Image: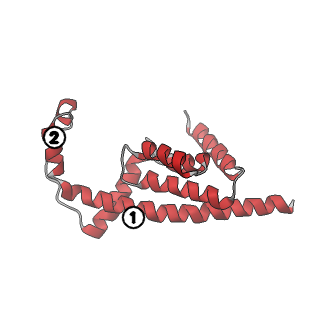
Amino acid sequence: MSFGDMRKNLSDCVIRLLALDDTPERIARAFAVGVFLAFSPLIGLHLLLGFGLVLFSGLNRFAFFMGLFINNPWTLVPIYAAGTCLGGLLLGFPDLPGLPALELNSVLSGDFWKQVAGHWHILKPMLLGSFLLAFLLSALSYVAALSLLRQRRARRQSC
């Protein structure tokens, strides 16, 4: 998929988001909750939590998943790097000791996870920074989406 194709797909999704038949508040809320989960440090649980939230909360599905899929294979590293950097600025950057080897056999063993847990001080900046980014960006995305949706609806009514 080329960059032009990705940009067109994103543009089509935004157009569909703005055209949803729901209240601007509900659409913006669903999008913001999706953005929160996308930036949260709950790696690997985003999709599972997303499906659960959509099924049991009545959020607008399309808007929610638009927000959730901001975190994808292309954005994963920059999102968590930004979160870790923010957390490091607030908590300080820890020294990086040698981490255990990341091989399939070692990852499946209990010893690997015990060694990772012993390096908790490395994970704290990522967790704090990611949650802070999640709160900040979900609030900003709510305000931005609500504003865009209201402007679009006002333009449609005036025509």
Placement of 106 over or under 115, stated as above or below: above
Residue 67 x, y percent position in the rendering: 54, 51
Side of 144 relative to 34 (left or right)? right
9 vs 46, nearest the viewer = 46
Q: Quadrant of the N terminus?
A: top right
User: In terms of sequence position, does the residue under pointer 1 or pointer 2 come before the other?
Assistant: 2
Disc 1: which residue: 132
Residue 154: x %, y % from top left? 78, 63
Looking at the image, residue 121 sits to the left or right of residue 40; the answer is: left
For the residue labelled by badge 2, is the local secondary structure a helix, a strand or a loop? helix
Q: Are marks 1 and 2 in contact (CB under 8 Å)?
A: no
Residue 92, picture quadrant: bottom left
Horizontal side of residue 8 vs 37, given as left or right: right
What label sits on residue 112 in the rendered view?
2
How packed mark 1 is, by other alpha carbons closer than 10 Å (few <14, some 14-19, many 20 or more), is some
Instruction: Give, as a three-letter code, the residue at label 1.
Output: Leu
Pick whichever, 74 or 112, lies toward us: 112
Outermost bottom residue? 90
Exactly how many numbered labels are in the figure? Answer: 2
Please report the residue visible at 56 percent of the width from the left and 50 percent of the height from the top: 64
Q: Is 11 left, or right, of 40 in this rendering?
A: right
Disc 2 crowd rating (10 Å Cα; few below 14, some 14-19, many 20+) is some
